[in-house]
Image (cartoon, rainbow, N blue to C red):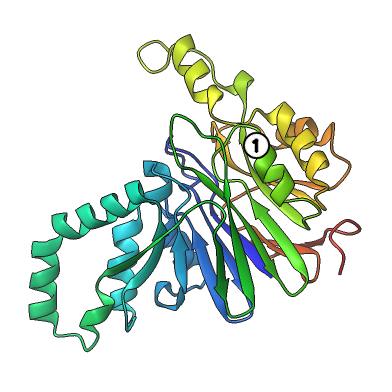
Amino acid sequence: MRVTLLGTGCPALHPRRAGAGLLVEAGDRRILVDCGHGVAQRLAEAGMRIADLDAVLASHLHTDHLADLWTLVVGGWHQGRRGPLRLFADPAVARLARGLEAAWAEERARRLAHERRPNPAGFGLLVEPLEAGRRLRFDGLEVEVVPVDHRPVEPAFGFVFRAGGRTLAVSGDTRRSERLIEAARGCDLLVHEVFVHRAMPVVPGVREAATIAAVASYHTAVEEVGPIAAAAGAGALLLTHIVPPTADPSELAIEAGRDFAGPVIVGEDLLSVDLSTGTLGWRGLVARLAPRIRA
């Protein structure tokens, strides 16, 4: 099983960090978790065809996790996808998906009529329900849907992937979540979001102290992430959804690692971790993550 970070950022635009999204591969299965701004382009950079995705899992209704959804629909159709894009979503995200279909209906009809591609069924969405406690199965890859705490956004989900004797836990957006810690117990790798208070100063006209407090209240502070990974007994910790995206990676690694003995990796777009070999790859760099992720 391998995970590739496609977007490690947040709503604040940054040239190095696209919106939230990651790809999980196990055998021939390819599952995309979230599709924030720029994720479709990152898929192309990673050498992955949108048309080859088995499904998209939506963690919750926030723009930075869903902005590229219609781009995935159109892009996969262009690449020859034979059927609609399969989206697992809660009712709120499902309504968004139906709204996108309605908003783009005229453009879709014009393209289908004019371009005469042989796969018209590929230009659409198949929305399937996503709910806490559900276990999805994709030919040897199992996904447990875990409720997390991102209130006032409800529902919000994390995911635990299991395949080939390996376990990958993904937090989604959340405060510290005991449900996630329990579901992730003993995982090989925990991918967790992070919020950095000291990197979010007040900027008049942009964000006030109340703004920072509000945003911080439904995310996980960097000093809390290490204890979460330790409580879960994770083999390694991978940080993503970095708020703000300008936070210093070296400082994040030190702070998150104070209360966690395993490897701490500060995510970058297109960074991948292969849980089967215990190796990390990014832009030609390959490193071994022994001993906690066992080969």
Based on the displayed image, in which of its 4 quarters is residue 122 positioned? bottom left
In the rendered image of this protein, does residue 193 appear above or below residue 131?
above
Is 169 positioned to the left or the right of 145 in the image?
right
- In the rendered structure, the answer to whether residue 39 lies left or right of residue 278 reads left
- Label 1 Cα neighbours within 10 Å, binned few <14 / some 14-19 / many ≥20: some
Name the residue located 50 percent from the left edge and 63 percent from the top edge.
Answer: 32
Residue 113 is situated, as x and y percent measured from the top left of the image, at: 8, 79
Depth check: 270 or 145 in front?
145
Residue 276 visible: yes
Which residue is located at x 65 percent, y 44 percent?
Answer: 192
Where 119 sits versus 219, above or below? Answer: below
Figure quadrant of the C terminus: bottom right
Quarter of the figure with the N terminus: bottom right
* Quadrant in the rendering for residue 288: bottom right
- The answer to whether any part of residue 67 appears in the image is no
- Indicate the quadrant where residue 69 lies: bottom left
Q: Position of residue 56 (x, y in %)?
A: 44, 63
Q: Position of residue 126 (x, y in %)?
A: 32, 69
Q: Where is residue 35 in the image (x, y as percent from the top left)?
A: 43, 55
| Closer to us: 266 or 180 | 180
Q: Is residue 26 left or right of residue 59?
A: right
Q: Which residue is denoted by mark 1 in the rendering?
A: 177
> What number of labels is visible?
1
Query: Disc 1 residue type?
Result: Ser
Q: Residue furthest right?
A: 291
Q: Compared to 200, does 129 lie above or below?
A: below
Question: Is residue 17 rendered to the left or right of residue 38?
Answer: right
**In this view of the protein, which residue sits in the foreground, 161 or 291?**
161
* Residue name at image x 46 percent, y 40 percent: 14
Q: What element carries label 1?
A: loop
Residue sitting farthest toward the bottom: 118
